[in-house]
Amino acid sequence: MSLGPLRSATALLAAVLVGSPLFGLTAEVRGGEASAPLVLRVAPIGDLGPRRDNRFADLPLALARVAALRRQGEGRAIVVALEPGTHRISAPVRIGPDHAGTEGAPLILRGADDGSSRLVGSVPLAPASVPPRLRARLPASARGAVRAYQLPEALRGELAYRAPRRLRETHPRVTEIFDAGGALRPAQWPNPGPNPEPNSGWTTVAAAEAGGLAFTLKDGPGLPDLSLERDLWVEGFWRWDWLLETLHVAQVDQRRRRLELDQPPYEGIRDGARMRLVHALGALDEPGEWWRDGESGLLLAWPSPGSADLEVSLAETLIRADGARHLRIERLRLERARGDLIVVRGGEDIEIRTSELAWAAGRAAVFEGVTGGGVSGSTVHDIGASAVRLVGGDRATLRRGGLFVRDTRFTRFSRLSQTQSSAIELDGVGAEASENLITDAIGYAIYLRGNDHVFRGNEVARLIHGLSDTGAIYAGRDFTARGSIIEDNYVHDIRTGPGMEVKGVYLDDMASGFTIRRNLFVNVQQPVFIGGGNDNTITHNVFVASSPMVALDARGLTWMKPSLNEVDSEFRAAFAAMPLDTPPWRMRYPKLAEALTDEPGVARNNQIVDNVSIGSDDLALTDKAEAGRQIILFNTRLDGPVPNPGDLEALARFTAKRGITLRLDPSKMRRDGLPASPFTDARR
């Protein structure tokens, strides 16, 4: 077993600084002679220095010059260099075909060598006075500490502080407030406490009413006065512990502790559901919280100690590239958007590298319909929803899109949309996520949709705690989404709270045709789970204190059977969307077109071969799954005193003494993967 080494982000950054062609174009070759790129400089906000040729007051002006130069026939690479400091924008910077260079002479947006160039979508807030009518509604402990700020005119007309978050929401659009340490939270009850855990900061539903719109809160002290709240929200795991929804409150009966919602959650409300109040002035009772008054346009906040200066996110997106070609974004800090930081639609050969993407309410980077490109050597943290979404290629013809995420550190993503969000989302055909560190968030590591993707050489750790019935590596509900490979990954410390269960790799709801090989699972609750699917291969993996190593059910014969038979089901719609009778599909999957007429609910032909389990049970078959329908061969279980799961050197010695050669190099599987961010301070 061999896991590819995680390349050093520090080494990559060093390559940039010395002008490596891998990360910075230093010259274009014309007729055998090198031609230096044209450099345009952008001054930071507040710079009062003289404007010179090729030095611009802001990024849009510099890009307008780029377009003019291209129209005039300029064929050299053009570098738009953002000087050290903060560059503020209030609307997306747009890049299109008129800015395009060539493969050898691209357009490069580049920050300073030390990573100090920041492109931000927030603006400072002006202090104001707290009106007496609002001060009187604050908790007594907060009245001397809460300050008022005037929101920008563009935000004063907002009817609510956010839109509802429901089952199908992929990326929220949310106003956020920032101090020097990052985003404050809307005032909530209960508070999460000084050392928050996934299950802290919640109360529960005492009783839900029929119809899914109204419920009463659990009895207990501390409920704030909600009688005057006009923009009150609640978020909760209303029915399932894999779905968190945020909904607006229509009515409050304070005496009865009864709340009624504007609209019901997905599949209603259950008694005992975890929930909390959000954006309540009466709950603004500790540092780091805020509340906005829709009537006056004032924001009330209790700043963190020493952080009285606040900013509000204003730009919906920082960079929007539509139909762009041959674009590089490098050595930049991109922060603080109400939606996504970077959106790329159409075009080709676009890469974000050695950059830091942080504090988006939505996603960090979205590539849709792009051919070639992605994210590499970067740091991505504190993202509201999924961090990076890549959609490329063409499923109808199985043409690959050539998109990638490589050598990148992901942490604290899915902070606003805590469920159904991931560090990386791959869709379409033929994308790659390799050599990344994905850790310490409530969301998935990766959500795989489409065909022929590769998830290779990544470290995945400490995710999805506090959830249930979900997985760190997730795919499902599309019988045609086949051909993806999960290999050479180090997956560890994937567990959840009491009474809940999570998976390492979750092939949910008939996911089929995946290959899972040469992975190391350490301290993972259910490392590989096949939810009714077929034709999956699980081979040459090592499972340490991770039990059972493979779980398999045949849900297509039980509770999921209606989805396979009903003509208008989501499952059948996904099946019908693919041209399974056309040559590329017939060649790859000759029997797939008839799959729904040939015992579709039977879980079969899953190959579980040549795996090693240490301190773990082997297989668990449930829901009418049959071992005789699978290929189960040559799996080895090692008993005896199991080494500390975190001691990889001891693990290698343990297996060697028992005659098992894992071909495992512990030095290449560091528990913390990539080194620290090359940027000086990950949480400003």
Image (cartoon, rainbow, N blue to C red):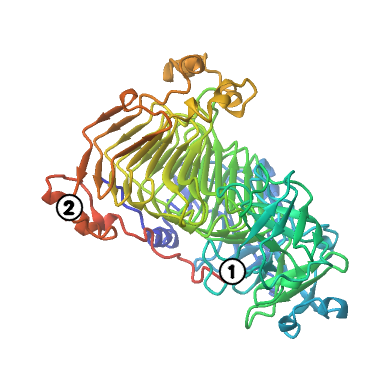
Apparent side of residue 76 relative to residue 187 in the rendered image (left or right): left
Quadrant holding the N terminus: top left
Pick whichever, 85 or 433, lies toward us: 433
Q: Looking at the image, can residue 625 be seen?
A: yes
Residue matched to label 1: 192
Q: 279 or 264, which lies in front?
A: 264
Please determine whether, in this image, residue 336 is positioned above or below residue 624.
below
Q: Position of residue 26 (x, y in %)?
A: 47, 54
- 241 and 272: which one is in front? 272
Query: Where is residue 626 shown, x and y percent of the image?
Result: 35, 27
Q: Nearer the viewer, residue 586 or 404?
A: 586
User: Is residue 124 something one can see in this rendering?
Assistant: no
Q: What residue is rendered at 73% in x and 45% in y?
A: 210
- The residue lying furthest to the bottom in this view is 144
Quarter of the rendering occupied by the C terminus: bottom right
Residue at numbered disc 2: 640
Q: Secondary structure at mark 2?
A: loop
- Label 2: how many residues lie within 10 Å, few (<14), some (14-19) or many (20+)? few
Quadrant position of residue 482? top left
Neighbour tally class for label 1: few under 14, some 14-19, many 20 plus, Cα within 10 Å: some
**Type of the residue with mark 1:** Pro
